[in-house]
């Protein structure tokens, strides 16, 4: 689809140099979405357009506006999509999917397209790539790796604003149970096993 190639060029120009939310992240989410679309028989054009545009506004986690990233991305995506051959109904499906995909919004998307985008984005937060991303983000925000008294949140609530390993317990290990599609659930289970194996290995090393 030619429109997707044009959108890729637009998005590449817009992305900030944030290793956790860069153009490579966009393309991994895009690839996840392609795989899920084939299994779930969704509208590939709409899902993949949403995947390309889902993080075109991405405030740093330390920014008070961070929770607004998906809402601002949805608004900006409408303007971009109007340049191309999308009708109003398609634009609404894509922008709603983008608005609702974020973990911080605590929403389950209403459409299959939205559910697939959310699953595709969440898959990139877990597995081997998820581990790389969480430590890249923690490093950029100058967070310590772990709480030396209770590294694995045995007796305290996770505080991922202070310790990076806490983010596994605050969010990453929960994502498997929050997946929407059958295809997403299967892949999330595999990737969550990688997270658990990593934490088990870390316990042996501390």
Image: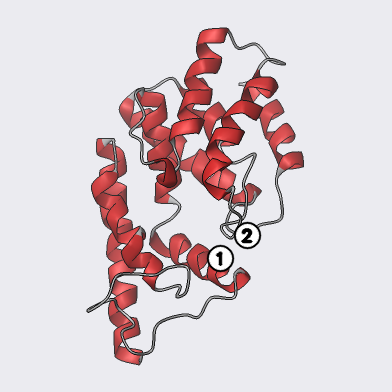
In this rendered view, identify the residue nearer to me: 201 or 101: 101
Q: Quadrant of the N terminus?
A: top right
Residue for badge 2: 19
CB-based contact (under 8 Å), mark 2 and mark 1:
yes
In the displayed structure, 91 sits above or below 6; it is above
In the displayed structure, 192 sits above or below 105; it is below
Q: Residue, x 29% and y 89% (percent of image)?
A: 204
Q: Position of residue 27 (x, y in %)?
A: 57, 44
In the displayed structure, 182 sits above or below 75; it is below
Residue that sits furthest to the front in the current view: 64
Circle 1 SS class: helix
Residue for badge 1: 137
Q: Residue, x 41% and y 25% (percent of image)?
A: 113
Find residue 147 and name its label.
none
Q: Residue, x 27% and y 64% (percent of image)?
A: 193
Q: CA distance from mark 2 to mark 1?
A: 8 Å
Q: Residue, x 45% and y 72% (percent of image)?
A: 164
Q: Horizontal placement of 186 versus 26: left or right?
A: left
In the displayed structure, 142 sits above or below 99; it is below
- Mark 1: few/some/many CA within 10 Å (<14, 14-19, 20+): some
Q: Position of residue 145 (x, y in %)?
A: 47, 80
Q: Position of residue 196 (x, y in %)?
A: 28, 69
Q: Name the image quarter holding residue 165.
A: bottom left
Q: Quadrant of the C terminus?
A: bottom left
Which of discs 2 and 1 lies nearer the camera? The answer is: 1
Q: Position of residue 91 (x, y in %)?
A: 55, 16
Circle 2 SS class: loop
Q: Horizontal placement of 24 versus 201: left or right?
A: right
- Mark 2: few/some/many CA within 10 Å (<14, 14-19, 20+): some
In this rendered view, identify the residue nearer to me: 112 or 186: 112
In this rendered view, identify the residue nearer to me: 137 or 43: 137
Q: Mark 2 vs mark 1: which is more N-terminal?
A: 2
């Amino acid at each position: 689809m030619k429109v997707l190639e044009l959108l890729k060029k637009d998005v590449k120009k817009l992305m900030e140099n944030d290793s956790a939310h860069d153009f490579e992240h966009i393309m991994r989410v895009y690839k996840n979405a392609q795989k899920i679309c084939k299994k779930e028989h969704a509208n590939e054009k709409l899902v993949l357009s949403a995947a390309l545009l889902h993080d075109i506004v991405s405030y740093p986690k330390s920014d008070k506006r961070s929770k607004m990233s998906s809402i601002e991305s949805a608004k900006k995506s409408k303007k971009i999509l109007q340049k191309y051959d999308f009708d109003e109904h398609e634009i609404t499906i894509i922008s709603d999917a983008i608005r609702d995909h974020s973990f911080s919004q605590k929403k389950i998307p209403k459409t299959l397209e939205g559910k697939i985008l959310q699953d595709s984005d969440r898959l990139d937060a877990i597995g081997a790539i998820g581990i790389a991303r969480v430590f890249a983000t923690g490093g950029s925000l100058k967070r310590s790796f772990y709480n030396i008294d209770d590294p694995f949140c045995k007796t305290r609530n996770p505080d991922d604003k202070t310790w990076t390993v806490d983010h596994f317990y605050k969010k990453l290990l929960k994502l498997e149970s929050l997946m929407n599609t059958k295809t997403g659930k299967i892949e999330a289970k595999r990737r969550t096993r990688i997270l658990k194996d990593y934490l088990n290995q870390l316990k042996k090393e501390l």
